Amino acid sequence: MIDSGFQDVAGLAKRLLMDSHFASIRGLDVRMTNEHLELYGEVETFFLKQVAQETIRSATRSFEVVNAVTVRSSWCSEKKQPIPGKIGCEIDCEVG
């Protein structure tokens, strides 16, 4: 069971995300384990993924941050879907 100190860290991290000027960062979630703080959800760019990680870093104390945020490409046409873990161009998209 995760103790209340861990929950406080996760709660603070979530509040920091909610206070962001970037709307997509506000929709990210945080999970706390005994070993690390995990950041997850989807954003549009690698820049926003990094901003989210740095936003919660002040809340993490001595916990490792695992950034499991997915970067969602908006460059693919409607007929193509981004391949998980890839971004951006037709080479990285599969026909859906």
Image (cartoon, rainbow, N blue to C red):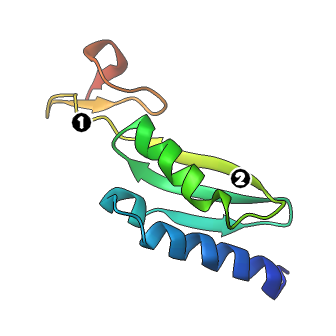
Residue 26, position as x, y percentages in the image? 40, 66
Residue drawn where x is 84% and y is 60% of the image: 62
Crowd class of label 2 (few under 14; some 14 to 19; many from 20; radius 10 Å): some
Q: Please, what secondary structure does the residue beneath circle 2 have?
A: strand
Residue 51 horizontal side relative to residue 11, left or right:
left
Residue 46 horizontal side relative to residue 5, left or right:
left
- Separation of marks 2 and 1 at Cα, in angstroms: 26 Å
Which residue ends up furthest to the top in the rendered image? 91
Q: Which residue position holds label 2?
A: 65
Residue 67 horizontal side relative to residue 85, left or right:
right
Quadrant including the C terminus: top left
Name the residue nearer the viewer: 37 or 83: 37
Quadrant including the N terminus: bottom right
Q: Quadrant of residue 32?
A: bottom right
Q: Please, what secondary structure does the residue beneath circle 1 have?
A: loop
Q: Which residue position holds label 1?
A: 74
Residue type for callout 1: Ser
